[in-house]
Amino acid sequence: MKPPRHLADLTVEQRGEVAVELGEKSFRAKQIATHYFEHLSDEPQTWTDLPTSSRDLLVESLLPTLITPVRSVTCDGGRTRKDLWRLFDGVLVESVIMRYPDRATVCISSQAGCGMGCPFCATGQAGLTRNLSAGEITEQVVASARALARGEIAGGPMRLSNVVFMGMGEPLANYGPVIQTVRNITTPMPNGLGISARSVTVSTVGLVNGIDRLTKEGIPVTLAVSLHTPDDELRDTLVPINNRFNVSEVLRAADAYEARTGRRYSIEYALIRDINDQAWRADLLGRLLKNRNTHVNLIPLNPTPGSKWTASRQEDQDAFVHLLEVHGVSVTVRDTRGREIDGACGQLAASEKNI
Ligand code: SAH
Ligand code: SF4
């Protein structure tokens, strides 16, 4: 069974066509979009620019409830909030809002679970349940923008400024709905949220075919590549898809993306004690990246329950940073927002500020 059709699954033209199929004027779809994306309203009874009968019909057909809140947990003095959502078929997914002085970011899920099987990742342990629809992904963004606008996140009302696909799932394994969501986020109001593409980060485990497709799309989102080690031998186990797309193929695809969009890409690297944090690996990574337009985000490992792996020692982390800097590679260690509430898929570390 598929999730019910939603405005956010459709192109602007298709939205108008649906209105016409329902016996309404096509401009009614734009009115609905205005309430949804621009006003962030979830109270159709207040949409008095629409006749009641048209409104009820359009809302029923274009704005079905796709995500229902189950639980929210906050930390960082109310500036970080994780929301757990139930989908139409009972499946659960998470999103996390992180507020900073100068911006507000939501980390969203693109799949329920993930099929990529990275052994250090909580989402990977459970396997893939299913892909989310564009409506289900977009709803996480819109609900977060609404919570921020309503001042539900400590610090007063604020605009959502950034979106990162770093929650559950591998975005490029659910390509169509993810791209449709990117369009909903970046299309100017009232048909989208009007957030700039560069403020959207798509994080991938390194699906080269997906990166190539994204390159052809020509939408200048920020690409984040989860590399985790510069050598194929270890990467084959840390990131099993490396057996299909190895380090040099992934970097070549990311370079092509950079060449096409002009956007520096980021390299995600979860530092795991005595596994991938040795000085020689830092040196190898530095040599690999020194002539590339990248930024390295080091993420202290957030251990998953029962895992024998843990975060690196402080001195090893410091040495790793230093060695990359010696090669002239831009690098930062991510802040670990929301760690005590076990961020999205237990690894939320998403601070895209350094890209
Ligand atoms: N599937 C995509 C996006 C979701 S994961 C990807 O893998 O890129 C978002 C980021 O969190 C990835 O860089 C991922 O490697 C990292 N991550 C996963 N589990 C983690 C953990 N236990 N500790 C730290 N980072 C983790
Ligand atoms: Fe999937 Fe990303 Fe987790 Fe790997 S790290 S299992 S690709 S969500």
Image (cartoon, rainbow, N blue to C red):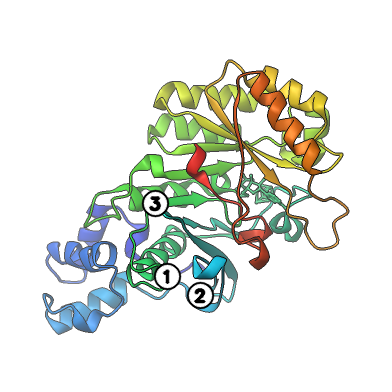
| Rendering coords of residue 152 (x, y %) | 41, 73
* Residue 338 appears in view: yes
Q: In the figure, 44 relative to 188: above or below? A: below
Q: How far apart are labels 3 and 1 at the CA level?
A: 36 Å
Name the amino acid type tagged 2.
Phe
Residue hosting label 1: 4
Q: Secondary structure at mark 3?
A: loop
Q: In the figure, 282 relative to 30: above or below? A: above
Q: How far apart are labels 1 and 2 at the CA level?
A: 8 Å
The numbered disc on residue 102 is: 3
| Rendering coords of residue 81 (x, y %) | 52, 68
Residue hosting label 2: 88
Asked whether disc 1 touches disc 2, contact meaning CB atoms under 8 Å apart, the reply is yes
| Rendering coords of residue 185 (x, y %) | 35, 52
Foreground residue among 135 and 34: 34
Name the amino acid type tagged 1.
Pro
Q: Residue at x 69, y 52 (%)?
A: 115
Q: Is mark 3 within 8 Å of ligand 1?
A: no
Q: In the figure, 349 relative to 19: above or below? A: above
Q: Secondary structure at mark 2?
A: loop
Q: Residue at x 30, y 55 (%)?
A: 193
Mark 1 or mark 2: which is in front? 2
Kindly indicate the quadrant of the structure image that contains residue 225.
Answer: top right
Foreground residue among 14 and 246: 246
Q: Residue at x 47, y 25 (%)?
A: 258
Kindly indicate the quadrant of the structure image that contains residue 340.
Answer: bottom right
Q: In the figure, 208 relative to 153: above or below? A: above
